[in-house]
Image (cartoon, rainbow, N blue to C red):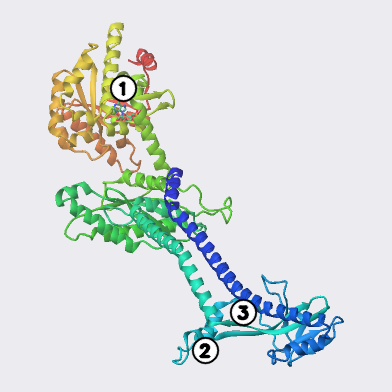
Amino acid sequence: MSSVDKRRFKRFKKKKIWPSVFAFVVVGTVCVAVDVLFLHLCILSVLGTKVAGQYEDVAQYGGELRMLTEGGTPLQDAAEQLFAGEMAGQDIYVTGADGSVVYQTGDSQPNFDRRLDIPLLDEIAALEDSAEVFTGTDEIIDVYRLARRDIMGNALETKRKDETYMQFMKTPVFGQAYWLGTPVPESGAFLYVKCRMEVERQDVFFALAFGIAAQVFLLIPVILLFIHTIRSAVLQKGLTQLIYMDTVTGGRNWLYFKNYGERILTRLVNNKKAFALVNLHLERYQNYRACYGVQAGESLLESMDGFLSARVGRNEAFARYEGADFGLLLQCDGDSDEERVDRCRKRIRSLLAELTGLRPNQKIHFDAGINMIPLHVGPDVKWYSRRKDVDIDQLYTYANAARVETAGTEEQRISFFDEDMLGRQKWERWVEDTMETALRNEEFEVYLQPKYNPVTGKLVGAEALVRWISLSTGLITPSHFIPIFERTGFITQLDDYMISRVAKLQAEWMIQGRKAIPISVNVSRAHFAQEGLADNICRLVDAYGPSHDLIELEVTESAFFEEKEILVDTVKQLKAYGFRVSMDDFGAGYSSLNSLKDIPLDVLKLDGEFFRGSEDDGGRGEIVVREAIQLAKNLHMSIVAEGIEKKEQVDFLASQGCDMIQGFYFAKPMPVEEFMEKMEKDA
Ligand code: C2E
Ligand code: MG
Ligand code: MG
């Protein structure tokens, strides 16, 4: 995935969901915290009010005790007087100015070692009771626990019939003894009164009601936010599924493949695994759609998708690229590169075989290009380093290039990508990009290869062979660009150019009074498919005016197998215009003697292959050459033997009456100036 794609995709994925989740978490936390705090404060204020009420009573007793002692009554008597009556039964503890106990009722007494910490009212001296250990304010303010204890302890039984509502609500659910102390002013004495803190049902109800109300109130935004977050998540999941869906197959699309494929390849655990990126192609899909309908075509792709999803494993991926092309990322196990390649080939072959059976009554073909992705290990690779810069599109392009290079030649073809293939394809592109400019810049040069009479040793003819003297690359021989020119159709322009150049040369030599030597020019078979070729050649030659019989046109033998009628017509017309026509490369491929019968050719050029056979063939090669020469002679054709490199070959051909020899034995193709010097000497 390119960096731009990645950025866009991340932006999409991060949209909406994270702000919602973040807001939900923040607001939720704040709400819970506020709720707990409110409940806490609420209970504390209830407790505070209760303690404050009891303290007021104690302080009032302290005031009364002071009045009595100021009136002269001793402290002990004053205490007895004050607490014996209506306060009888209440635990009281009075200490004098020296700290000694002056008066005490009840069994228990304040525990002076344990001062209680009552929040909000810390100026009050609150002390734990010696007989009843204080459970702590935390327990009291844990209103939920109190309520639960009340229910569990069956205290919260349904209200009895004889019980008033107030009695029911006033029933305590928690009680705790403690002492409140107050100084008796001016006397140095202290009065301690044992009190009881009681949390009643109404307190618990109040706190619970308040807490629940606060919770409901605060939870509304939290719930709304929660719903919003869930909706965003669902929406995003749906959107993600949508952007990852292929609208034709209903399966995953290319974006998913790139994203997931990249994740697979960059996973650390996959470093020691090899993969193959495969371009799977259904042949003649457009034809299938045209014949069976668009819907049938799309249904076939859908079936392919379904089939592949059952065959592609967890650590693998696939998706449709476009048209009827699918990309597959497959894991290739094996102990060596060869084994991995072999297994991969077998797997793809069986996949293709199964795919062919998808439509039992229809003939469908597939081919595949495979780009192997090797293990990411080796001396330079650290064990923790992942595959970097994985570009699925590029890897797929190479797989596709491998497929395209060999497509259409054989059923179910499987081809592997390699660097040479890339080099070839880059070369082809360069040739295609530069050929027109090169022709305009006259970068194509005529080289001439002499033809000799083997008996006299005289130079009697020449073949014009093109050389591309590229300004950037230097000399390029025809085999590197002629096939590309033939494929693109540019060959016709080159052939025209060569014919013009040779015509011009012949015209110049004529003016210069040089010896007339016929020169043959190659005419591509692609050219022969054109109507009016003879007229065109005639026009090109006549532009310079040399005699037509000085120009010979070479047509390769293979051209005679296609478009025979046009070819025969063209040859006849050329001959009528006075040009000589030769059959080039006779014997290089599948020769057909029939073509010699049907086409009135002037010259037969025996291919160098004839002479490159094994030495110990029992003389069979010589018999074939001899008979071929005899055949041509009987058909009144001249014979040129090409590719002759050895003296024995020359001698043999001379003895058989071969008219001309063209080969490195005499001379290689050479620039025109050099040829002219040779012509001066040898012609
Ligand atoms: P061709 O027309 O059969 O040309 C003969 C080829 O054989 C030439 O290769 C030549 O250099 C080579 N040759 C000649 N004698 C010997 C020998 O003794 N030993 C060996 N090993 N080779 C020898 P070249 O120049 O590389 O051309 C290759 C082919 O490219 C030509 O085969 C022809 O088919 C094509 N070609 C060359 N120039 C043109 C052109 O201007 N137009 C067209 N259409 N095709 C051309
Ligand atoms: Mg030739
Ligand atoms: Mg040839």
Q: Is residue 623 left or right of residue 433?
A: left
| Residue at mark 2 | 155
Q: Position of residue 424 (x, y in %)?
A: 39, 38
| Residue at mark 1 | 464
Tell me if I can see residue 152 in this picture: yes
What is the spatial separation of the Cα atoms under label 3 and label 1, in whole angstroms?
A: 112 Å
> Local crowd at mark 1 within 10 Å, few (<14), some, or many (≥20)?
many
Q: Residue furthest front?
A: 71
Cβ of mark 1 under 8 Å from ligand 1: the answer is: yes
| Residue at mark 3 | 139
> Local crowd at mark 2 within 10 Å, few (<14), some, or many (≥20)?
some
Instruction: For marks 2 and 3, give the one nearer the viewer.
Output: 2
The residue under label 3 is which amino acid type?
Answer: Glu
Is disc 2 in contact with disc 3, using a CB cutoff of under 8 Å?
Answer: no
The residue under label 1 is which amino acid type?
Answer: Ala
Instruction: For marks 3 and 1, give the one nearer the viewer.
Output: 3
Which disc, if any, is residue 173? none
The one of 341 and 239 positioned closer to us in this rendering: 239
**Ligand 2's quadrant:** top left
Of the two numbered discs 2 and 3 on the same chain, state the one appearing first in sequence: 3
Q: Position of residue 538 (x, y in %)?
A: 19, 17
Q: Position of residue 131 (x, y in %)?
A: 72, 89
What is the spatial separation of the Cα atoms under label 2 and label 3, in whole angstroms?
A: 18 Å
Q: Helix or strand or loop: what does disc 1 sit on? A: strand
Q: Helix or strand or loop: what does disc 3 sit on? A: helix
The one of 324 and 360 positioned closer to us in this rendering: 324
Residue drawn at (28%, 6%) of the image: 511
Residue drawn at (68%, 80%) of the image: 57
Q: Position of residue 62 (x, y in %)?
A: 75, 80
The residue under label 2 is which amino acid type?
Answer: Ala
